[in-house]
Image (cartoon, rainbow, N blue to C red):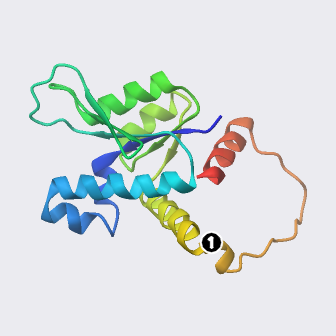
Amino acid sequence: MPPHLLIDGYNLIRNSPLLSPIDRQDIEEGRDALISRLAEYRKVRRFPITVVFDGGGSFHLAPEAETRLGIRIVYSSRGQTADELIVKLAKQKGKETVVVTSDRGIWDRVKREGCVCVPSELFDRRIDNALYELYKGLSLDDEEGDKKKSKKGTARRLPKKLRREREILKRL
């Protein structure tokens, strides 16, 4: 089963060297650029993706959601922050959820639920790598010539939880 990506939208935008200048010009264009970028990423990695934004001054009592370019976009409701909504959605989705944020408060809360967390900066680089694969046909890692290191020393097996996290992160 593929992991479900749950993304803290504004956190990813503001930690991306490509998207943050667009966001400073116009917040709506920043959101649109993120959605377009994630739609391209989704062509390579067929994961379900949900992006959460603060609803801000919206008058809706329930979270507002829409789907654009195959990406589910959720805005928090009145009186609720995007952080609270991310934690709530992570609890609902379960352990196969990967939460993308650099917000330590969210990170700690969703880790307790058994979710895997990825810093926004790292995920932004993973998007770059996936898009490079899409357009050039090979991975940035392949081009850099990553060589397999020979195993040395005694074998030590990581705990199951860490092995699961590593496996999920490899698939991103």
Query: Who's the residue at 40% across and 47% down the image?
Result: 101
Please tell me in which quadrant of the rendered image residue 20 appears. Answer: bottom left
Residue 105 at what x, y percent from top left? 36, 39
- Give the labeled residue for mark 1: 137
Residue 97 lies, in percent from the top left, at: 53, 35
The residue located at (16%, 25%) in the rendering is 79
Picture coordinates of residue 89, whole percent (x, y)? 41, 27
**Residue in front for this viewpoint, 1 or 125:** 1
Give 110 or 25, whichever is nearer the viewer: 25
Q: Quadrant of residue 25?
A: bottom left
Callout 1, which amino acid? Gly
**Percent position of residue 159, x then y:** 74, 39
Kindly identify the residue that appears in the image at 50 percent across and 65 percent down. Answer: 131
- Decide if residue 36 is on the left or right side of residue 161: left
| In the depicted structure, whether residue 161 falls above or below residue 144 | above
Dot 1, how many residues are within 10 Å of its Cα: few (below 14), some (14-19), or many (20+)? few
Q: Quadrant of the N terminus?
A: top right
Identify the residue at horizontal 29%, vertical 31% (top origin). 65
Left or right, 168 with reference to 103: right
Q: Vertical placement of 27 versus 140: above or below?
A: above
Looking at the image, the residue that sits furthest to the top is 61
